[in-house]
């Protein structure tokens, strides 16, 4: 569970959900939990300084979704498509660091569409807003060499629904991940 869950009156505005991430494994586990939860069409925007753990979280996301790896920092490409190994949505992993303006995934000519994929954009703040009104924005903050803090902002009608808020609030990065590993490929 997040450290604190505060719902604003009326349920139309939700405070960010917060987690303490004491180790890289915990950050990855939060990604796994999110990956098991997210559906085709969902957009996750990651922010945080260099080395905050955006790619580490994305690796967990890929594990949770059951997509083909490896997931690395997309250094020389803007985005990479990781197809599903389990008949689910692909993971589109984009890095907006070097993009000056808006991110138009359509312009990237990817072999995947936003509707059919789970899309994660590193450095996406101020860039990925164009992609969808419904987004999860996860801000990672460095606390110490080994520890991070995460705050998840829920934006748009999809994420303001009480069921969605409740489901996200119950994600626990410390719970053990599935004992069965995803298939290799
Ligand atoms: N609690 C933690 N959560 C995530 N990563 C951690 C944590 N503690 C230590 N680390 C380490 O910090 C580094 C995070 O690197 P990562 O590539 O995930 O960051 P990033 O935000 O994607 O960086 P960049 O801005 O360069 O893309 C890794 O070496 C990881 O092992
Ligand atoms: Mg990265």
Image (spheres, helix red, strand yellow):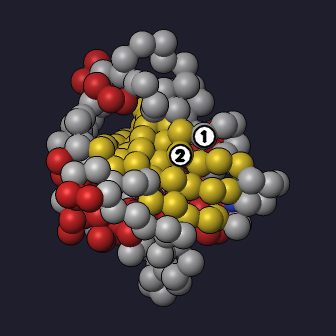
Q: Earlier in the sequence, mark 2 or mark 1?
A: 1
From this view, report whether residue 86 is shown above or below residue 80: below
Tell whether circle 1 marks a residue whose Cβ is less than 8 angstroms from ligand 1: yes
Q: Nearer the viewer, residue 83 or 153?
A: 153
Q: Are marks 2 and 1 in contact (CB under 8 Å)?
A: yes
Res. 36 visible in picture = yes
Left or right, residue 75 beside residue 69: right
Tell whether circle 2 marks a residue whose Cβ is less than 8 angstroms from ligand 1: no
x and y percent of residue 7 in the render? 33, 62
**In which quarter of the view is residue 17 placed?**
bottom left
Q: Which residue was labeled with disc 1? A: 48
* Residue 139 circle label: 2
Q: Residue at x 70, y 43 (%)?
A: 51
x and y percent of residue 23 in the render? 70, 66
**In which quarter of the view is residue 165 placed?**
bottom left
* Residue 151 circle label: none
From this view, report whether residue 41 is shown above or below residue 36: above
**In which quarter of the view is residue 137 placed?**
top left
Q: Residue at x 33, y 50 (%)?
A: 154
Q: CA distance from mark 2 to mark 1?
A: 6 Å
The C terminus sits in image quarter = bottom left
Mark 1: secondary structure:
loop
Q: Residue at x 20, y 57 (%)?
A: 10
x and y percent of residue 46 in the render? 49, 42
From this view, report whether residue 51 is shown above or below residue 60: above
The 10 Å Cα crowd at callout 1, few under 14, some 14 to 19, many 20 or more, is many
Q: Residue at x 36, y 30 (%)?
A: 128
Mark 2: secondary structure:
strand
Left or right, residue 100 beside residue 65: right
The 10 Å Cα crowd at callout 2, few under 14, some 14 to 19, many 20 or more, is many
Count the marks.
Answer: 2
């Amino acid at each position: 569970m997040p450290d604190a869950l505060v719902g604003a009156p009326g349920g139309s505005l939700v405070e960010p959900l917060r987690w303490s991430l004491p180790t890289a494994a915990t950050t990855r586990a939060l990604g796994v939990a999110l990956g098991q939860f997210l559906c085709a069409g969902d957009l996750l925007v990651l922010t945080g300084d260099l080395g905050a753990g955006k790619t580490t979280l994305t690796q967990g996301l890929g594990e949770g979704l059951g997509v083909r790896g490896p997931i690395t920092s997309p250094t020389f490409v803007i985005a990479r498509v990781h197809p599903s190994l389990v008949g689910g949505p692909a993971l589109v992993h984009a890095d907006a660091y070097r993009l000056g303006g808006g991110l138009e995934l359509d312009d990237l000519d990817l072999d995947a569409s936003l509707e059919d994929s789970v899309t994660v954009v590193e450095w996406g703040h101020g860039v990925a807003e164009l992609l969808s009104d419904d987004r999860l924005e996860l801000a990672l903050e460095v606390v110490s060499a080994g520890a991070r803090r995460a705050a998840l902002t829920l934006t748009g009608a999809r994420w303001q629904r009480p069921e969605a808020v409740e489901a996200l609030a119950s994600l626990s990065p410390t719970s053990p991940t599935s004992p069965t590993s995803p298939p290799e490929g």
